[in-house]
Image: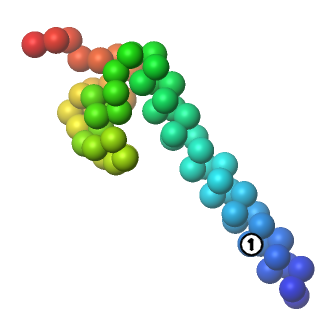
Amino acid sequence: MRSYRFVAAALAGLAVIAFSALPLDAKLEFSKLEKKGCTTCHVTAKSKELNDTGKYYKEHKKLPPAK
């Protein structure tokens, strides 16, 4: 019984690590590609919430045209 709990906890931990790393890599990749900071697309630098520019980028895979 203990071994099942250990295996389940270990798998859950690995899943969290694997999936939490993906968005961070993507943000850094986009930031380097576009030469813009995180707040260009996000409400704050540490937020996952997108602003209007971020929503446009997510849909069109490019920054919106300058106004």
Please state which of residues 37 and 14 is positioned toward the viewer in this rendering. Answer: 37
Q: Residue at x 55, y 34 (%)?
A: 25
| 37 up-or-down from 15: above or below | above
Coloring applied to the structure: rainbow
Residue type pointed to by label 1:
Ala
Q: Quadrant of residue 60?
A: top left
> Quadrant of residue 15 in the image?
bottom right
Q: From the image, which quarter does the N terminus lie in? A: bottom right
Is 18 left or right of 6, judged from the image as shown? left
Q: Position of residue 43 (x, y in %)?
A: 25, 42
- Whether residue 43 is visible to the viewer of this picture, yes or no, is yes
Closer-to-camera residue (55/27): 27
The relative height of residue 16 versus residue 37 in the rendered view (above or below) is: below
- Eyeballing the image, is 3 above or below 33? below
Q: Quadrant of the C terminus?
A: top left
Q: Which residue is painted at 69% across and 63% down in the image? A: 13
Where residue 7 sits in the image (x, y, percent)? 83, 71
Residue 5: which quarter of the image?
Answer: bottom right
Residue situated in front as seen by the camera: 11 or 35 = 35
Residue 44: % across, % down: 28, 44
The 10 Å Cα crowd at callout 1, few under 14, some 14 to 19, many 20 or more, is few
Residue 50 seen in the figure? no
Query: Which residue bears the numbered disc 1?
Result: 9
Residue drawn at x 51%, y 40% is: 23
**Residue 61 location (% of width, % of height):** 39, 20
- For residue 63, above or below residue 24: above
Residue at 34%, 48% (x, y): give it.
47
Residue furthest to the bottom = 1
